């Protein structure tokens, strides 16, 4: 036999909601009906008991019944009230009944006759099998021990049977109506979920991330729809950026690869034909091959850096001296521009960042300044209270090009003849943003360009100087 829980879980959501609604209403109706039935029966029994107490036999009726019993009459004198059965118990144990069927004397009746109880109220069966409610009380009159007054319970049973059928019918109608209402409510309430499901299935079939779900209201389904729309928008943006990155990377790789293939083919043809290249040309070709390989390696490294998701763990964030990492980056920049003069003014500043990524970003900024500085020019580097400024004295950047400098693979028309991939400043912007800072390029007064990086931090390190994962440094 199939597990009921497994069967229930295999049903559609709207069917489960309708079934749960019907079950809940059925339980509530059943509890209310049972309570109504028992309360009604208890009330009717209480009224029956009250009517028995109010129907005591008067002395004349008791005397008449006692005389009839003592005279051994075949038909006792009938008592008033056809709905009642009266019965007396004489002191000698003889029983006389005013009714069609005697009522067996119970121990509770005998206890009243012996004076052990003031009265007795109980249910018993008459000799004809009818259920009777009996009230027994003492009666010291003409050798009468007790008087019992009885009334059939069929009056209550018939009424309760009718009430039970009525409650059952009403309960059944209520349960069926609740199930239908639950199904209707489930269908109406799950329409937004159905639209969401259809949208997801459409995306799964077509991979179309431009579809959006209409948002109505402020309920949980509306919040889910907004979240889903935001997720698909982020996925579409991520896919577009990925496609753009691949296209741009292919375009940028084509130039060095073409140049490298041309140089290698010249060297290979020289070897195949046995016609040696002039030594100067060969040296120039080898130098060009080496430069192209270096450019390819740098471009591939930049692509790997940019292709790595922001959420990927890059290593522990540490409180590091920005001025110390900047000095290391300056040593590397001096090797790339040995004819340039570097004027520095560095004040201590500690930030939280990944040391390797931060140094790479600083090297890119300095390398950009070296690239655009005139021969025997000067590069000014200052670090004051978390603001790093790298200023060169080159041709500068036209104002219309400034909004594009941090875009991937974007290169100024005047810089296309210089080595580089157009990814350096993109890496700088990404690293600085991850450290909680900002970066901007602005025209410098007197010519040239100034790169300004602001990073939150403090002029002194924390007392422990340990790896910090959550708390931020307060800006001094």
Image (cartoon, rainbow, N blue to C red):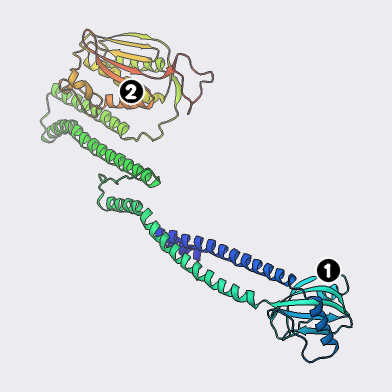
Q: Which of marks 1 and 2 is nearer the N terminus?
A: 1
Identify the element where label 2 is drawn: helix
396 shown above or below 218? above
- CA separation in Å, label 1 and label 2: 105 Å
Residue 443 location, quadrant: top left
Question: Which residue is painted at 33% across and 50% down in the image?
Answer: 196
- Where is residue 161? Give x, y as percent: 58, 75
Q: Name the residue under label 2.
A: 361
Q: Residue at x 22, y 29 (%)?
A: 409
Q: In which quarter of the image is residue 136?
A: bottom right
**x 88%, y 71%: residue:** 115
Quarter of the image for residue 326 reads top left
Which SS class for mark 1?
A: loop
Q: Which of 467 and 250 is in front in this view?
A: 467
Q: What number is the disc on residue 268?
A: none
**Residue designated by label 1:** 118
């Amino acid at each position: 036999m199939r597990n009921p829980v497994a069967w229930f879980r295999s049903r559609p959501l709207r069917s489960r909601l309708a079934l749960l609604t019907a079950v809940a209403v059925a339980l509530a109706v059943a509890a209310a009906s049972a309570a109504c039935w028992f309360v009604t029966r208890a009330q009717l029994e209480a009224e029956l008991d009250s009517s028995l107490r109010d129907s005591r036999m008067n002395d004349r009726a008791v005397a008449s019944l006692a005389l009839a019993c003592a005279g051994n009459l075949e038909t006792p004198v009938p008592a008033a009230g056809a709905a009642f059965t009266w019965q007396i118990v004489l002191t000698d144990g003889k029983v006389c009944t005013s009714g069609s069927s005697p009522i067996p004397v119970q121990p509770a009746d005998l206890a009243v006759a012996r004076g052990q109880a003031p009265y007795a109220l109980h249910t018993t069966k008459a000799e004809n099998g009818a259920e009777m409610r009996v009230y027994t009380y003492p009666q010291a009159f003409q050798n009468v021990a007790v008087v019992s007054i009885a009334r059939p319970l069929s009056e209550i049973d018939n009424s309760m049977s009718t009430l039970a059928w009525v409650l059952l019918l009403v309960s059944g109608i209520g349960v069926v109506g609740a199930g239908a209402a639950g199904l209707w409510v489930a269908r109406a309430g799950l329409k937004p979920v159905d639209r969401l499901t259809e949208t997801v299935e459409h995306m799964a079939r077509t991979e179309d991330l431009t579809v959006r779900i209409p948002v109505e209201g402020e309920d949980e389904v509306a919040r889910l729809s907004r979240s889903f729309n935001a997720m698909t928008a982020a996925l579409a943006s991520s896919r577009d950026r990925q496609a753009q990155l691949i296209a741009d990377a292919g375009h940028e790789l084509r130039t060095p690869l073409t140049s490298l293939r041309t140089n290698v083919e010249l060297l290979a043809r020289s070897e195949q034909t046995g016609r040696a290249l002039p030594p100067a040309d060969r040296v120039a070709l080898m130098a060009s091959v080496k430069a192209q390989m270096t450019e390819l390696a740098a471009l591939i490294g930049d692509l790997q850096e940019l292709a790595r998701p922001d959420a990927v763990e890059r290593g522990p964030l540490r409180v590091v001296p920005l001025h110390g990492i900047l000095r290391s980056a300056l040593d590397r920049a001096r090797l790339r521009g040995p004819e340039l003069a570097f004027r520095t003014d560095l004040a201590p500043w500690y930030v939280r960042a990944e040391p390797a990524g931060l140094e790479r970003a600083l090297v890119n900024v300095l390398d950009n300044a070296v690239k655009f500085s005139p021969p025997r020019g000067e590069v000014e580097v200052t670090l004051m209270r978390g603001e790093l400024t790298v200023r060169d004295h080159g041709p500068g950047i036209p104002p219309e090009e400034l909004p594009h400098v941090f875009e991937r693979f974007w290169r100024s028309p005047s810089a296309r003849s210089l080595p580089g991939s157009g990814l350096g400043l993109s890496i700088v912007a990404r690293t600085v943003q991850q450290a909680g800072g900002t970066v901007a390029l602005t025209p410098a007064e007197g010519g040239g360009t100034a790169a300004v990086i602001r990073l939150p931090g403090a002029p002194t390190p924390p007392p422990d100087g340990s790896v910090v994962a959550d708390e931020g440094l307060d800006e001094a």
